[in-house]
Image (cartoon, grey):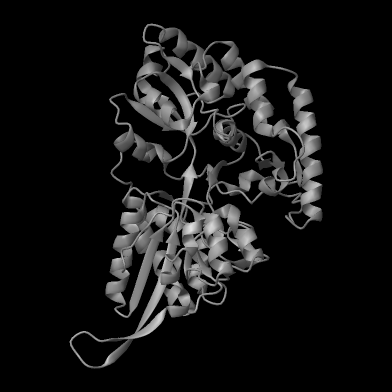
Amino acid sequence: MKRNQWMLAGASLLLAGSLAACSSSTASNNTKAEGGDTSAEQTKLVYWSIDRHDSDFIEQKISEYEGLNPNVDIEFKVMADNYAQSVDIAFSSKQAPDILRVDTGNVPAWVKKGYLESFDSYITPEMKSRFESVLINEKNMVDGKIYTLPNIGQFWRLIYNVDLFEKAGITEPPATLAEMVEDAKKITEAGKDSGAYGFAGNFKSGSGFERIAHPITTLSKTEGTEGFNFQTAKFDFGMYKESLEALRQIVVDGSMMPGSESLDIDPLRAQFAQGKIGMYFNHSVEPSVYKTQFPTEIRWAAALPPTVDGQQNGASQVISGSYLAMSKDSGQKEAAWKFIEWMYSDEVQIAYQEGGYGVSVIPSVAAAAKAPDIPGIEDFLPTKYDGIYPATPFTATEGRLEGTKKMDVFNRYIFTGGDLDKDLQDLNTRYNAALDKAKAAGDTTIEAQPDFSAVSLQGSLVKE
């Protein structure tokens, strides 16, 4: 493997000469076999990723693969910035990589642009069956064809400080929204001497509210996520009403950490590690964060999200859906597929989870992999109440939205109050008008699923 990982500071560098060296048009050449005079055909593959956190693991696995396949040379590059733009430039200049790390949101667009090769001609029935329960339209598939497969997911939990809970006389994490509000109040009262607060959120981020409301709502209800009702194929932000009211009450009670409206995730983590926050929501990356980035002496744990009424009627949304894809322009498709197939093998994916790089959504891997040696990770492993939802048209819709976005409306209500019913009705009207425009433009083809129920997702990620 050529170990010339590089961080792309700007898409303009792509055309400055670096990219020319990795053109798939020069992917095969004849080289002298080691120790002899005969020639062996060397196949060169170029693999792009945007992930830094697992680059050492990927390099190790590439070296293993090259050892098993001496005639294959894989050039691996990690791109730091402007990844989507860099991919656009690479394809337009006929210098695209053979293998790409693809994000879920890019799959339909990149298929439409002609960037991705379908896996359908390559994948075996046995391999397809391993992923059958986690194949999602417009995340892995477009028009019934498979373009990428999932590997890991973000498993969302309520993360809480055990010490602060005990100090406030609380023995268990909250099971309902009402208990969450009450527990936040108790922790704040008990934590006055140390400046601790019951709850915090990273509301500076556009996803701050979603990190709280999506897990609660999807585990509580059956109709959809991201404010989208799959049964009607319409936006209905009323699904978030109870969560919004609970967060507003936490603010009114004085239980929300001051400054949360401008708090980012790392400062929040730093405050939690110092014992200043009773509860917050985030996903399965947190155990690694508290092992390496913010080492802490506090006792902390994580639990499934509370629900509106204590009933787990749906499935807590797992963010997942894509990983590796193959370039349609690759001149080495068979070789690229063999490497992709190997990377998706249970052997590699089990090692990936056990190495602490992510929690797998592949049922056969989840059943066989051991928990990585990271304190707290056991609380984030798949349960029967976790599930991957169908794709929603949210991104395509918001790109055509007129007026204030939902996040700004929600944050304003949480921190300053207002007429929530009026806000929700206004959001429904504007987002559904934007959805109609997105449909008319061909940005989404999503249709109503009258029989959809999130309860059917329960058990999809674990083998009973």
Closer to the camera in the image, 38 or 289: 38
Identified at 30% across, 37% down, the residue is 292
As drawn, which residue projects farthest toward the bottom? Answer: 38
Closer to the camera in the image, 26 or 159: 26
As drawn, which residue projects farthest toward the front? Answer: 16
Does 240 sit above or below residue 20? above
Identified at 49% across, 64% down, the residue is 15
- Is there any visible trace of residue 49 in the rendered image? yes
Q: Position of residue 116 (x, y in %)?
A: 57, 68
Q: Position of residue 64 (x, y in %)?
A: 28, 68
Identified at 53% across, 42% down, the residue is 385
Closer to the camera in the image, 79 or 384: 79
Q: Position of residue 392 (x, y in %)?
A: 67, 48
Is 269 on the left or on the right of 40, as rendered? right
Closer to the camera in the image, 13 or 427: 13
Is 419 on the left or on the right of 334, as rendered? right
Is 392 on the left or on the right of 297, as rendered? right
Identified at 48% across, 53% down, the residue is 10
The image quadrant where one finds the N terminus is bottom left
Q: Position of residue 66 (x, y in %)?
A: 30, 73
- Is there any visible trace of residue 464 in the rendered image? no
As drawn, which residue projects farthest toward the left? Answer: 35
Does 44 sit above or below residue 388? below
Kindly indicate the quadrant of the structure image that contains residue 55: bottom left
Q: How many marks?
A: 0
